[in-house]
Image: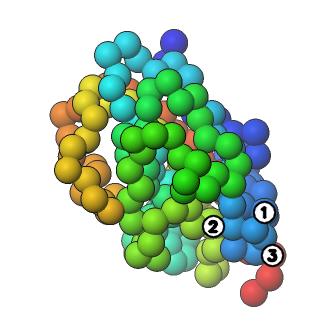
Amino acid sequence: MALEISSTAFGPDTPIPTRCTCEGNDISPALHWRGVPAGARSLVLIVDDPDAPDPRAPRMTWVHWVLANLPVDSGGLPEGIAPAALPAGTVEGLNDWKRTGYGGPCPPIGRHRYFHKLYALDVVLDGLKLPTKAQVEAAMQGHVLAHAELVGTYEKTRR
């Protein structure tokens, strides 16, 4: 079985619920995974938006959430998980608001895509302290056993 990531809050290429965005409660969606390969020692979750600031003229990828060293047997994360409730050993990274934790969709214009990327690694990443997405990706190099992603979309209803 291949590595898979899913959510009860939204399906592939469908809208992320307002409660999980800046127009709602800004809480993380429930995420579930399965098919973690044998030999995996940790998981990494990165949520980002490659359509920032405008999907018709993207200039950057905005990072919404970075988690490293998730236990391979965790199976997922519940909706609205608090930092203190993250599985033991999980390392929180910095998002592009320069803080840890989940930051929900809040696109300035248009419908954006939000990639929920899960990586199974053959190591536990050492020496991470408030890492950025780039630092986690550099540390993962050569250690990715499997990768899965779930893409949700969001467009603000208010301006």
Report crowding for label 1: few under 14, some 14 to 19, many 20 or more residues within 10 A (C-alpha).
some
Which residue sits at x=44%, y=32%?
A: 71
Question: Could you tell which of marks 1 and 3 lies nearer the N-terminus?
Answer: 1
Across and down, in percent, residue 26 comes to 69, 67
Label 3 – label 2 distance at C-alpha: 12 Å
Q: Pick out the residue farthest to the bottom.
A: 159
Q: Kindly identify which residue carries mark 3.
A: 157
- The residue that appears at 56% across and 23% down in the rendered structure is 34
Q: Closer to the N terminus: mark 2 or mark 1?
A: 1
The answer, for residue 11, to whether it is visible in the render is no
Q: Determine the residue positioned at 62% across, 81% down.
A: 108
Q: Quadrant of residue 121?
A: top left
Q: Nearer the viewer, mark 3 or mark 2?
A: 2
Labelled disc at residue 134? none
Relative to residue 75, is residue 77 depicted above or below?
below
Front residue (pair 54, 105): 105
Secondary element at tag 1: helix
Q: Can you give x and y, in whole percent of width and height, for residue 138 in the image?
A: 21, 50
Q: Which mark is residue 105?
A: 2
Asked if disc 2 and disc 1 are in contact, CB closer than 8 Å, the reply is no
The foreground one among 124 and 1 is 124
Disc 1 from disc 3: Cα separation: 12 Å
Q: CA distance from mark 2 to mark 1?
A: 10 Å
- Position in image of residue 153 (x %, y %): 67, 57
Mark 3 is surrounded, within 10 Å at the Cα level, by few (under 14), some (14 to 19) or many (20 or more) other residues, namely few
Residue 50 in picture, x, y percent from top left: 47, 62
- Of residue 125 and residue 37, the one placed in the foreground of this image is 125
Helix, strand or loop for disc 3: loop
Q: Residue at x 20, y 50 (%)?
A: 127
Q: Give the residue at mark 1.
A: 19
Say what amino acid the circle numbered 3 marks.
Thr
